[in-house]
Image (cartoon, coloured by chain):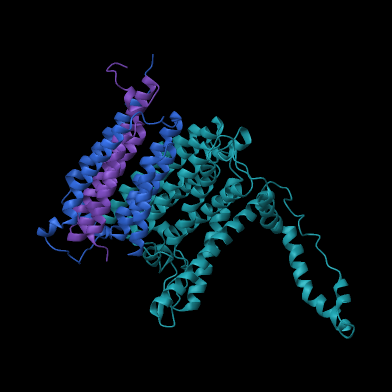
Chain colours: A purple, B cyan, C blue
Amino acid sequence: MISTQLVLTLSAILFGLGALGVLVRRNAIVVFMCIELMLNAVNLSFVAFARNWADLSGQIAVFFVMVVAAAEAAVGLAIIISVFRASKSIETADASELRA
Amino acid sequence: MHMGIEVVIFAIKLFLVFNIIMGLASFCTWVERKGSALIQDRVGANRAGAYFDFNLDIVRGFPSFLRPLGAPVTYALLLPVVTGIKIAGQLGIINTLLNDAVKALFKEDFVPDGVSNFMHSLAPFLAVLPVFVAFAILPFAPEFTVLGTVVRPQLAPIDVGILFFLAMGSVAVYGVALAGWTGNNKYSLLGALRASAQMISYELAMGISVVTIIIFYGTPDLFKIVELQEGSILQWGVFRNIGTGLIAMIAFFIAGMAETKRAPFDLPESESELVAGYFTEYSGMKFLIFWLGEFAEIALFSFVMVLLFFGGWHIPFVHLPAGVWWVALIGHGVLMAKVLFFCVLQIVIRWTLPRFRYDQLMNLGWKFLLPLSMVNLVIAAAWELSK
Amino acid sequence: MVAFAILSVILLVSALGVLFFHNPLHSALSLITNMMGIAAMFALLDAHFLATVQIIVYAGAVMVLVVFVLMLLNIKEEGPRKTTRLFVLSCFVAGGLFMYFGVPIMYNAFAQFPAFNPNFNGSMQTLGKELYTNYIFPFEAASVLIMAAVAGAVMLAKRKFR
């Protein structure tokens, strides 16, 4: 029997690590990957709660989070490609001009 | 005690499934070599082991009082073995299964300059592991009862069976992409990207065919799907629902051949003949792992097609009692015969048709198969609802 | 329980790998491992359909996109950190975020909600029924969202004709 508290603690640790990655790394794609890590941590806590309270809304929320994350991945990577084409670098500090 | 029985049964099932995979992959390799030779009107491999012979000098080592007995006994014991080896050699079995493996083992194993050693070695495993894992959800015989316990010959009886197979198809893309990237040259990378784009495009048509199948049977559990096909031959997936089963089978077959990068969709491999393919920088054992994975994937697709569309282990006009162990053996034999038929069919198609151009391939995937599968899905759903 | 312990170790190690590898392709491979671990965790928590969908969508499509972008743009490693002050500050911020979620969990602040309910039917049939009856509007809205995202991505990444 897996205790829900343990799973939630694990999810909180993963979320914290993802947040650390977003703040520390300068490569735009790695920042994007850490955002995906945070979303996965949130999915994990949704599923843990769904099992805890025998309510399927948790799993449906996970379903929609996955859909939105996939859409965001497509658009976000397209933006990164455009920025890379304009400034030839994907360090987040180099996209500081308002005009390309 | 009960837990011990479960572990033993699981270990036996694991051993059997591994043997099935290796046996099917080896058989497909041999049929590829010799069958392609027959189709192309040449002889093929028939040298290794075909001139194996023995002499009776070993009888000289026997003690003197045994020597008169020694010769006939040795002759009688060794004659079948030697004849077997000669016949196998002439059919090309020893050449394909033994010589190629030993040659690949002793080749130099190199990593291109400037490429991470870990990723270069990881790519063959990423290409092959999903195929092997996907064999876990396939049932290979009907259920039977032995010593009071019901044994279901399926390594992982999960209730979302077929979707796991789709998931493993999605993961297999990484092996190809990584193999092309670690080749450290543009041709390798472009070949790998084309191959992955092909695999991803045809996954869609395959997924929609699988959804059509789930509509027919009402459950994605593979064991229940095969159980629902018993009875007459009209219960088989191919003949269900006024022809939508047939179209789903055709779409699944074409998409499956494109997934395994077999001809006529073998642009990734043909590039090895033209410029360089995605496994150009692989030699020796790693190349053999890719090769084995490709044939295991052929076996996997044939297996899944037989389970979904062609009745699994059911013989058309014969009704056998359920739950008996010898019926399970017969069922397993029938299943393997059907799977081998489809493996050989895929190999024969490879050596018969010319390959597609890349834009023809993409057109077929996106503009023909995907709308066909979707319309098929809608018609199948409407028919199922109107029942 | 043993499976949960092993999976947690895999999840934590791969998350640290995502953060601390220099080569972004190694980070991507770590994230793929993490997503497979999360899929296994879903399966342990009786959400089998979601585990399969996680592998198909996340590990099999989103990460393939990321890996392709990394390969095509030939992203190299980033240089060394310019200052450690920002790193330490970020550690404190992330630790604060963890504490914000972790403290209520550890002090069991959600005990005020209904207790653990052991009859959980997380099968595919019930999930599908729920999705198509109570949540049909978000479902259709999600399909419109995906179509908009596809159109947007194609438009953004196309080369402008001179």
Q: Position of residue C76 (x, y in %)?
A: 45, 31
Can you name the residue that lies furthest to the bottom here?
Answer: B65
Residue drawn where x is 45% and y is 35% of the image: B362
Q: Is residue B128 left or right of residue C88?
A: right
Is residue B247 rendered to the left or right of residue C151?
A: right
Q: Residue at the top extreme?
A: C162
Instruction: List x then y, in percent, for residue B311.
Output: 44, 63
Say if residue B208 shows up in the picture: no
Image: B310 above or below B110: below
Please indicate whether residue A6 sits to the left or right of residue B104 in the image.
Answer: left
* Residue at position x 24%, y 37% in the image: C144
Q: Who is closer to the viewer here, B145 or A63?
A: A63
In the rendered image, which quarter contains the C terminus of chain B?
bottom left
Q: Which residue corresponds to the image point at 39% horizontal and 62% vertical from the top-left?
A: B222
Q: Is residue B232 above or below residue B239?
A: below
x, y percent for residue B325:
48, 78
Residue B85 visible somewhere in the drawing: yes
